[in-house]
Amino acid sequence: MEVLLARENGFCFGVKKAVELTEAAAETGKTVYNLGQVVHNPKISERLAARGVKVIKDPGDASDGIVVIRAHGVPPEVRRQIEDRGLECIDATCSLVLRAQRFTKQLADEGYRVIILGTPDHPEVVGLKGFAGDDYVVVETKEEWAKLPKMKRAGVVSQSTQPPWAFRELVSHVAEIAQEMKVYNTVCPVTVKRQVAASELADQVQTIIVVGGKNSANTRELVNLAKMQGRTAYHIENADELQPEWLRDQERVGLIGGCSTPMDTLLEVKERAEELAAAVPA
Ligand code: SF4
C-alpha cells in the first residue's frame, strides 16, 4: 500500500511564528503563559508544557512574567487587561488575522453592520467580535444567513479558515438583502491552498487520513472537504489512533495535515500506516 502525502503540508507561517515566539519566550527563564492553547495541536501543547509554558484562559490567571497572545488573536479589551496587570506581552497574532481585525474595525467605524462568517465561539471569531462595535452578527451556515433581515449597510468579513465557497455564497446572499455592501475577503490563502491540495488528493485516492487537533478549524474543514467529494475521511491527532481496518484492501491512501500539524507527526503517521498495511492480512 502506498501513502500519498498531499502537496501542501506542515505548519503555516502564522502557526510557525506563534510556536517560535513562545519557545523564545520560554528561553528567557521568565514565567511564560499562553493565553489559550497557542495553536490547536496537542503535540505542540505538550512540547511547550515540557518547557514550562503554562496555558491560561484569562490574563487575570497570570501573576507575573510574559503572556503570549496566540495566532488567533484576542479582542482589544483582553490586550488592555494584559497591559493593565503590568504583564509583558508578546503578540503572536498572525498577520492575516491582524488584517481581518483591522478591516472589521474599519467597517464598524464606517457604520456598517458587520457580518462575520465563522464559528461564534472560535477564538479568532471571539477576537474579531471585539473589533466589530455594537452592531454585528456571526453566521456559520446557510440556514443562519438565510434568516438575516434586510439591512441598509452591511460589511462582510470571514474567519480565516472558512471555506471560500461559503464566503462567496454569503456575499452573494448579502448582496440581495443589503442596500449597500462592503466586503473584505479575509479567508486565509494558506488554508485555501491546503484545501486545493486536499481536493487534488481526493482525485487520487478513496480514503484520506487527516491529521490535526480535533479542535482545529482548518483541519476539520479538510475532513469536510474530503467527505463532500465522496471520500472516506478519518480525522486523527497522532499515529496511535490509526486503525488497521481502515487500510485493508487499499492500494493507496491519502495523507494530509492541518496548518497546525507538525511535519514530524505527519511522517510518523505515514510510517505507522505503512507498517500496519504490511501486517494486515489481505
Ligand atoms: S491558517 Fe492562515 S490565518 Fe491562520 S495562522 Fe495560519 S496563515 Fe495565519
Image (cartoon, rainbow, N blue to C red):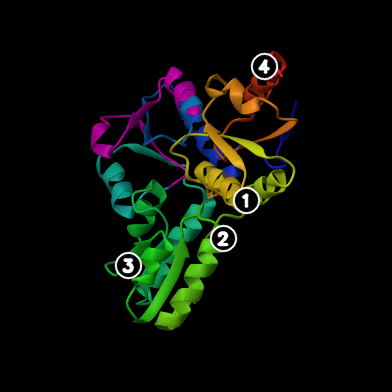
Do we see residue 90 in this rendering?
yes
**Circle on res. 136:** 3
Q: Residue at label 4?
A: 280
Q: Nearer the viewer, mark 1 or mark 2?
A: 1
- The percent position of residue 238, horizontal first and vertical second, equals 54, 25
Amino acid type of the residue that numbered disc 1 sits on in the rendered structure: Gln
Q: Image quadrant for the C terminus?
A: top right
N-term-proximal mark, 4 vs 2:
2
Lower position in the chain sequence, tag 1 or tag 3? 3
In the image, residue 224 above or below residue 254: below
> In the rendering, at what x and y percent does residue 126 appear?
34, 52
Disc 3 secondary structure class: strand
- Tag of residue 229: 1
Q: What residue type is disc 4 on?
A: Val
| Amino acid type at mark 2 | Pro
Taking the spot 47% from the left edge, 46% from the top edge, the residue there is 93
Quarter of the image with the N terminus is top right
Q: Nearer the viewer, residue 226 or 104?
A: 226
- The reply to whether dot 4 and dot 2 touch (C-beta < 8 Å) is no
